[in-house]
Amino acid sequence: MRTATETDASDLPRSQTVLDMLRALLLDGRLAADTRLNEVHLSHEFDVSRTPIRAALQTLAGEGLLEYLPNRGYKVRAIPLSEIVDAYEMRALAEGLAARLAAERGLTPLQQGEIESALALGDDILNAPGETLDNQRSAYGAINDRFHRNIRDAAESRLVRDVVQLCQRVPHASAHNIVAFEIDDVRKRHGEHHKIYEAILFREPKKAEALMQAHVLGVKSAAARAVARLEFEKGSSVQTGRQRQRRA
Amino acid sequence: MRTATETDASDLPRSQTVLDMLRALLLDGRLAADTRLNEVHLSHEFDVSRTPIRAALQTLAGEGLLEYLPNRGYKVRAIPLSEIVDAYEMRALAEGLAARLAAERGLTPLQQGEIESALALGDDILNAPGETLDNQRSAYGAINDRFHRNIRDAAESRLVRDVVQLCQRVPHASAHNIVAFEIDDVRKRHGEHHKIYEAILFREPKKAEALMQAHVLGVKSAAARAVARLEFEKGSSVQTGRQRQRRA
DNA sequence: TACCGCCAAAGTGTGTACAATTCTTGTTGA
DNA sequence: TCAACAAGAATTGTACACACTTTGGCGGTA
């Protein structure tokens, strides 16, 4: 998600590595909630001094992944389930606004090309007969990113970009979970992409906003279903392979 | 706006002062856009070492007030007018969501009391015959804050809180500008507060959300009118006092 | 036994020296 | 005159030392 050219208010050349690695750890949930992060320990772990460690921790606290306690350092913030749900609600509003602004301001030829190729690639992937479902889903993740990112870019609003980023940095609230979706859900979302693009292309701000809001909320439901399915499979039987195949 | 108890992912005891002073400078627009901030210079200015300065700068970059360039330090980010407008649009959505969530989850007796007293105080202030208009407006600022803050608290969503904070930290996009509003605008906004509170009290999420969105967008328009009026007065004549009185 | 205060250990907050990078400026050559 | 280059200055990036705060344990006292 993060690129080197992104002016991200992050920090320093060397700290960059530390920051990215720590953030990945947190987003993947590999660090338990309420775990306290010792600066000296981390500095040995990453083989740097405390200075870049502190910089990274401060940035992560600013992103809401860590909690800061004066004179007592940082600890992993516990994310309540409600916050993950809220992240989808908020993102629906923010990306809806992005779609509206994009429809108002119009697309550059480049953005238009990017989006159309993303849509076409999506069509191909979802219709490819030889591919396995898992391959289709994981390949679709990148396509999905490209579609949404180009619309956000077209909105030309830093604030919208920041808010979406804030929502995506809530652990487990990212669309990367698409790999666990039902394939029918992925198809449905892709169809919605087409409709949203049309609305933006035809300069219908209200329609684009409404469609995008519904789209993201649809993703929320699909994610909830995916989580419920995974929980069910984990808890009920060891034959997850058969169940996954039947339901997909 | 910031209190000591707020877990704000900011930073360190001593840096706190530096951070707050620098932020105030930036929000008031007292530092020109693209000004580069020299760490050594600032450390002499505030009579601390570079360490707390760096911490403050990093936090401010995270808040979007500064821009970070690797190996080249921080500079004041230029805020385009469109971003101020976007901040109101985004805040309308976020506070709308807050109102909806508050209506869904309900108010605590304490929040109910806070809001009702804010509404009553507002009624008193706006109806007080002896007060000057300027006094009324500045006194209303705190009331306004209290109303909105309690609704956000009732939403119990960290993300909503963060997004609103992000919007309010866009220079010139804060409701503190209320001191420049037409007094009739302030009266209108106050009336909307009453309606919003009713909707939340009667547990009407959709209605609360719609009313709050319209309310904040109304504030946007009022702010735009206020800015236009100030520009007009500044550019047209020196008799600002008489004009302000006539229009108010 | 329960409670209080003191002390030591651990860990964070700050200052500062030094390394690495970027910017400035003066010089040289065409 | 201008461009390219190089040396020096300025500025940021990192490491590390030390001061302050917090915390947990220990012993003494009621």
Image (cartoon, coloured by chain):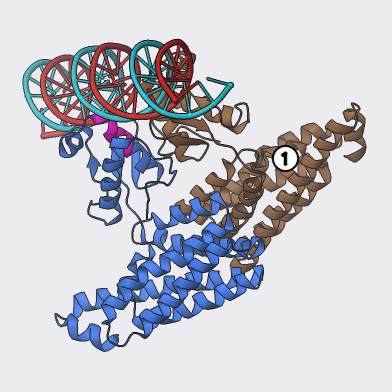
Chain colours: A blue, B brown, C red, D cyan
Specify the subunit that label 1 lies on: B
* Image quadrant assignment for residue A49: top left
**Looking at this view, is A147 or B98 the one in front?**
A147
Q: Is residue C26 above or below residue B145?
A: above
The correct choice, above or below, for B230 with respect to B14 in the image is below
Instruction: Count residues near mark 1 (Cα–Cα under 10 Å), then give few for <14, some for 14-19, many for 20+.
Output: many
- Quadrant where the C terminus of chain B sits is top right
Query: Toward the viewer: A137 or B151?
Result: A137
Percent position of residue A129, x then y: 31, 88
Judge whether A218 appears above or below A148 on screen: below
Per the picture, the main secondary structure of the magenta-coloured stretch is helix
Q: Who's the residue at 75% across and 50% down the image?
A: B221
Q: Nearer the viewer, residue A128 or A91?
A: A128
Any part of residue B76 in sight:
yes
The residue shown at (65%, 58%) is B212
Per the image, the residue denoted by label 1 is: B178
Q: Give left or right: position of A178 versus B221.
A: left
Please say whether residue A229 is visible from this viewpoint.
no
Quadrant of the drawing holding the N terminus of chain B: top right
Q: Could you tell me the amino acid type at mark 1?
A: Ile
Query: Which residues make up the magenta segment?
Result: A49-57
Q: Quadrant of residue A237?
A: bottom left
Please tell me which residue is depicted at 39% across the width and 47% down the height of the picture: A64
Q: Position of residue A15 (x, y in %)?
A: 29, 37
Q: Where residue A1 appears, x then y in whole percent?
A: 37, 56
Q: For residue B151: magenta?
A: no
Q: Answer with left or right where residue A24 lies relative to residue B2.
A: left
Q: Secondary structure at mark 1?
A: helix
